[in-house]
Amino acid sequence: MSAPLPFEGRTAVVTGASRGIGAAIARRLAQDGAHVGLVARHAGPLKALAAELAGAPSGVTALIADVTDPSASEAAVARLLAERGRIDVLVNNAGGNVRRSAADTDLALWNDLIRLGLTAPFHWASLCAPSMRAQRAGRIVNIGSVAGATALPTGAAYAAAKAGLAQLTRNLAREWGPDGVTVNLLAPWYVPTPLTEGVLSDPGFRSAVLACTPVGRLGTPEDVAAAVAFLCGDEASWLNGAVIPLDGGFSAASFYP
């Protein structure tokens, strides 16, 4: 008799699931036995991933929704709860950045990035937490960035959203921990994805990133997915309110010529 899969019988939600890090997380959780609600705003890539994972042990549900749209978000969560009866895991992965100086960032762009990077994760956590708290068990993993703790040359709005997300993680961990819900954040450094392919295609920039990364390589979406799987598993039940750099040692290193 084969051993049960780690997430057998559990329902997970992954936002921004159609590509990059989100798709890798969705694949890992589905392969490990979770039924995964795949959330993204573009139907084509989302349906393609759902078709790819249709044979996963517990299946998947494609939920087409813009995470910054409150009504669409509420409808997506309500549909998954109606179909599955519970939500055990939420991975707030959806995000985006515009590499622009603060002087060139107008209020509309600022609001858009804060809404995507901070307000939407709060809303999705608020929508999924009641199910977790009622069953006195749940995992929320927020995908942050080293930009939330380290000043980079551009992207002030993105950095502010990620810093806020780190503090939101701590507050929710404090508030919901007594109900059996853990909330943690992973803060990756550069991982090749559609979001970073522009800057990483510059050989000089890529070399500079690697020079600042003690392990000497970029991360992969699968590296992030593996860390998410650990945080969502039973062995991480005492890990709560953590903001974890996932960066090959970048944030631990200091400049030395």
Image: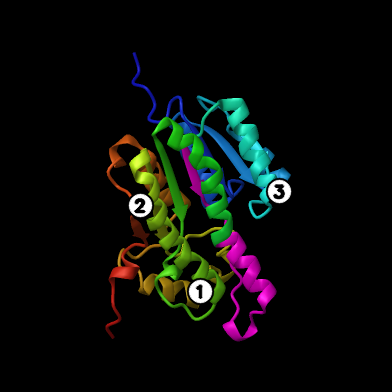
Q: CA distance from mark 3 to mark 1?
A: 31 Å
The foreground one among 7 and 256 is: 7
* Residue designated by label 2: 174
Q: CA distance from mark 1 to mark 2?
A: 43 Å
Question: From this viewpoint, which residue is outermost toward the top?
Answer: 1
Q: Is 23 contained in the magenta span?
A: no
Residue 65 seen by the camera: no
Q: Nearer the viewer, mark 3 or mark 2?
A: 2
Residue 152 seen by the camera: yes
Q: Amino acid at mark 3?
A: His
* Residue designated by label 1: 203
Quadrant of res 135: top left
Q: Residues within 10 Å of mark 2 (few under 14, many from 20)?
A: some
Task: Determine contact: label 3, label 1, CB under 8 Å.
Answer: no
Of the numbered discs 1 and 2, the one sitting upstream in the chain is 2
Q: Residues within 10 Å of mark 1 (few under 14, many from 20)?
A: few
* Residue designated by label 3: 42
Q: Amino acid at mark 2?
A: Arg
Task: Determine contact: label 1, label 2, CB under 8 Å.
Answer: no
Of the numbered discs 3 and 2, the one sitting upstream in the chain is 3
Q: Position of residue 211 (x, y in %)?
A: 36, 74
Say left or right for 96 vs 88: right
Query: Residue at (46%, 29%) from the top-left corner?
Result: 10
Q: Position of residue 235 (x, y in %)?
A: 28, 38
Numbered label tally: 3
The foreground one among 200 and 80 is: 80
Q: Secondary structure at mark 3?
A: loop
Q: Position of residue 191 (x, y in %)?
A: 47, 60
Query: Residue at (64%, 83%) from the top-left corner?
Result: 104
Quadrant of res 7: top left
The foreground one among 229 and 203 is: 229
In magenta, the rendered stretch is 89-117
